[in-house]
Image: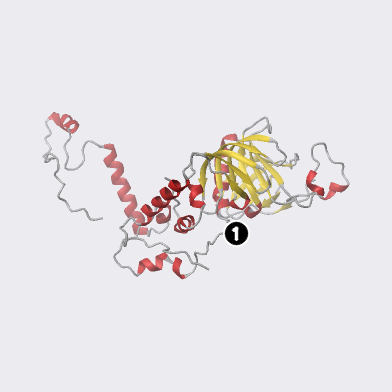
Amino acid sequence: MEVSHSVKERTIAENSLVILLQGLHGHVTTVDLRDESTATGRVTNVDAFMNVRLAEVSFTDRQGTVSRLDELFVTGRNVRYVHIPDEVDIRATIERQLQAIHRVRYFGGRDKGRREFPRAKHK
Amino acid sequence: AMSFLKRFPPPAEGVRHQQPDTEAVLAGRTPGAGTLYIAESRLSWLENSGVGFSLDYPTISLHAVSRDLNAYPWEHLYVMVNAKFEEEETKEAPMAEGEEEEEDSDDDVEPIAEFRFVPSDKSALEAMFSAMCECQALHPDPDDEDSDNDYEGEEYDVEAHELEQGDIPSFYTYEEGLSHLTAEGQATLERLEGMLAQSVSSQYNMAGVRTEDSIREFEDGMEVDIAPVVAGQFEDAEVDH
């Protein structure tokens, strides 16, 4: 189970749908980029800023040319859409990721140990 | 000539990876062999003559390792940049075949520039890729209005909160914790790791435990007076984490 080592990133993930993308590690998925190109590959990492790292990628550039890339890193800013594979149970994935974060956070017991950012600020 | 080249000293700080003997290719043209510096502040490439260029991470949309020789004849680090790198002579000089910028007339399309960094040492591509991932992650998008990532300020100061809590243990994950170690903490860590290393090498001789294998080892007459383990011996111990 991949959980970020950073307090801030765990907090961001917990409060956004990035947490779903982080549950896609190991799955093959297609990422549509902002410039209309697409990349299909196995998710190896998604961080709190939605930077996506894929392996064994089939990349189709905006002209339609296809090439293979061993590894690809797309910045969050340039991700337009991440396809969720059909076999992924979205709710179960989110719950699993939240549990992983809580295991890290509440290591010393519910009210002991490190108190991370309890609630997001709401504007 | 590639007019965007300028002279500058190589980065001195935060260089995560440096790859000498690397060609930089833009739109099929290469200024020659040089060194790629993957530093935390920016990505720089310097020709051996001392001129080169830098790319800022926020302008980089993606980077990749390409080993597909059908797509490009050499294994390389591919970097796509959201910017135009134009040569001043473009209008006068004839365009070489295949280098026409089809997007010139289309104002809606974002400019992109594709760089390929071809190291003579192909096995370095993994390290180059990873170093770039790390540096890229240090530059999250400041214009990101969609997400409510407003976790700065008072409430976020976890450390200050912890200091008030006296004896409550603080739990760090590995990477965060290492940087918080004092000199004493570092010495303790080293001592503990040394002890672990020793115990791994003599795994049948755990203190207080005599396994079947260790009994065999001691049959040379050297009796070691160790209490045999009784199943459930420690069941009533109080575990206090």
| Residue A80 left/right relative to A19 | right
List x then y, in percent, for residue A119. Answer: 44, 64
Residue nearest the observer in this picture, A31 or B230: A31
Residue nearest the observer in this picture, B8 or A1: A1
Q: Residue at x 84, y 47 (%)?
A: B90
Q: Residue at x 60, y 55 (%)?
A: B41
List x then y, in percent, for residue B33. Answer: 69, 40
Q: Residue at x 14, y 50 (%)?
A: B236
List x then y, in percent, for residue B233. Answer: 13, 44
Q: Identify residue for label 1.
A: B144
Residue nearest the observer in this picture, B102 or B186: B102
Amino acid type, mark 1: Asp
Picture quarter with the N terminus of chain A: top left
| Residue B225 left/right relative to A14 | left
Q: Can you name the residue that lies furthest to the right here?
A: B92
The chain containing the residue under callout 1 comes to B
List x then y, in percent, for residue B23. Answer: 68, 40
Residue nearest the observer in this picture, B190 or A94: A94
| Residue B99 left/right relative to B175 | right
What element does badge 1 sit on? loop
| Residue B51 left/right relative to B230 | right
Quarter-of-image position of residue B155: bottom left
Q: Could you classify mark 1 by the number of other residues whose Cα lies within 10 Å: few (under 14), some (14-19), or many (20 or more)?
A: few
Colour option used: secondary structure
How many numbered marks have been drawn onto this rendered protein structure?
Answer: 1
